[in-house]
Image: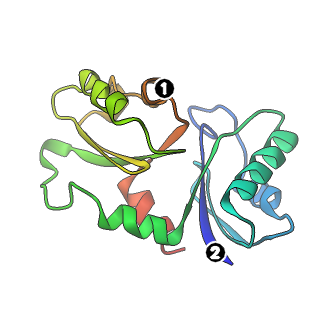
Amino acid sequence: MSRYVAFLRGINVSGQKLIKMETLRQYFEMPGIKNVVTYIQSGNVIFDATLAREKLQVKIEKQLAQQLGYSVPVILRTISELEAVIKNNPYKSRELADGAKLYVYFLASSPDPVQVVLLSAYLSSGEAFTVIGRELYFLSTAFGNTKLTLSEIERKLGVKATARNWATVNTVINM
């Protein structure tokens, strides 16, 4: 049995696709999934599962689509994978000057390195990013106004993704 975190994309954002976390927990109560907990309203679900990752992801996405009536992309990471995300943070020794904050974009698959280079054109002053495996670490002083949006990242890299701030990443690993 493995402990997973499901990062759901696009729920409870800007008043759209609203779902209560209690209801979301109930949707995850399926055979092969146990010990379900949620963290904050942005779709972070932590649970234990016996199923293989691919089957698990399909099962969760199918269940959510059936219950909610719309598709919700789900990005899964094991707790050990999240530990590696924290360990591999390329900005840990860098001061977060001028109010810069760190975000992690969890990608559904590893992107093409050529496509990653093209993302640099979308960086604004005070921004930097690094891709390591299936994660894009993003430093920004104005995340809400960045040109390097989630939609651009998905479009340019050709992969599903969802973003979490560094505090959330560090909290869900201990749940």
Label 1 amino acid? Ser
- Categorize mark 2 by other alpha carbons within 10 Å: few (<14), some (14-19), many (20+): some
Task: Identify residue for label 2.
Answer: 2
Q: What is the quadrant of the N terminus in the image?
A: bottom right
**149 versus 138 height, above or below:** above
* Label 2: which secondary element: strand
Tag 2 near tag 1, CB within 8 Å: no
Tell whether 26 sits left or right of 75: right
Tell whether 114 sits left or right of 173: left
Label 2 and label 1: CA atoms lie apart by 30 Å
Label 2 amino acid? Ser
Q: Residue at x 74, y 73 (%)?
A: 50
Q: Residue at x 21, y 44 (%)?
A: 100
* Precedes in sequence: disc 2 or disc 1: 2
Q: Position of residue 29 (x, y in %)?
A: 82, 64
Q: Position of residue 47 (x, y in %)?
A: 67, 69
Q: Position of residue 68 (x, y in %)?
A: 82, 39
Tell whether 17 sits left or right of 146: right
Which residue occupies the extreme bottom position in the image?
1
Task: Identify residue for label 1.
Answer: 151
